[in-house]
Image (cartoon, helix red, strand yellow):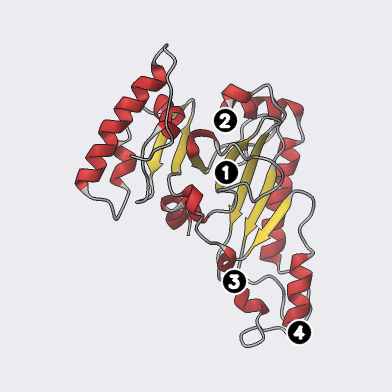
Amino acid sequence: MQEFLELHPCFLPGATDNIGPGGHHGPSFSAVIRQPPLKGLGPTRVPDFMWVRRDTGAIRPICIEIESPRKTWFNKGSRTPTAELTQAIDQLTEWKVWFSSPENQLIFAKTYAPRYSHRPVEPQFVLVYGRDSEFRAATSPHDNPDYMRQKRDHMPRSREHYFTYDQLAPEREAGDYATLTRQVDAWSLHSVPPTFSTGHHITEMSEAIGDPSEGLSRTDLMSTERKAYIVDRWKYWRGIALSEHNHMFSNGRE
């Protein structure tokens, strides 16, 4: 699932402003970050994915943990969470502890949103786990699947959001969002979806990444001609991003 979602980030919760408050200015770099290292005080934490959404009031990272769709939420017969679910939720707790440090928040802002590092950091946390079939009468192993669904829906704590894989759906707005990797002190393009287009929305990303060719090589369902066109337009928008002159942009897609 990790590989599929890296290639198709529009399925990830948080691609739009549907997780937590604010974040309506979109994600940094118009991209999701795969396995971003959270380095600072204490052990380094590594979510599976992270959006860094923002608005005028705050930087709003959305850290995502994905588990297997085969895992179950509750033990059969006891109504208690499985050990695997408890471990997954503990992962979110570890991230909360990391972000609770003001020093870590400062490091995070300078690393992942340097243009907005003066803004407060207000994170949200997402768990994607299991399938809806556990809570449907025809397929559930539980005596009262409706009750277990209600229990599941009441489990998320503050700033937490839980999903099954059946709840994931592509967001049209996120069709242009890429997938990036953070490497020490530099960025690389991991991949773009087949729906990817260029335009002024890639200026921030093209400023940070000089050549998109490696990422394009992982993109399926895209012709060689289309990839060559994106490389050409990438150079153009990188030139705009690095220019000292002011420019006016339209919202067209290329």
**Residue type at tag 1:** Met
The answer to whether residue 208 is above or below residue 75 is above
Which residue is the site of mark 2?
112
The 10 Å Cα crowd at callout 2, few under 14, some 14 to 19, many 20 or more, is many
Q: Position of residue 117 (x, y in %)?
A: 64, 23
Q: Are marks 4 and 1 in contact (CB under 8 Å)?
A: no
- Residue at the limit of the structure toward the left, as seen here: 225
The residue shown at (27%, 34%) is 231
Q: Which label was assigned to residue 50?
A: 1
Q: Are marks 1 and 2 in contact (CB under 8 Å)?
A: yes
Which residue is the site of mark 3?
131
Q: Earlier in the sequence, mark 3 or mark 1?
A: 1
SS at badge 1: strand
Q: Earlier in the sequence, mark 4 or mark 1?
A: 1
Quadrant of res 97: top right
Q: Earlier in the sequence, mark 1 or mark 2?
A: 1
Which residue is the site of mark 4?
144
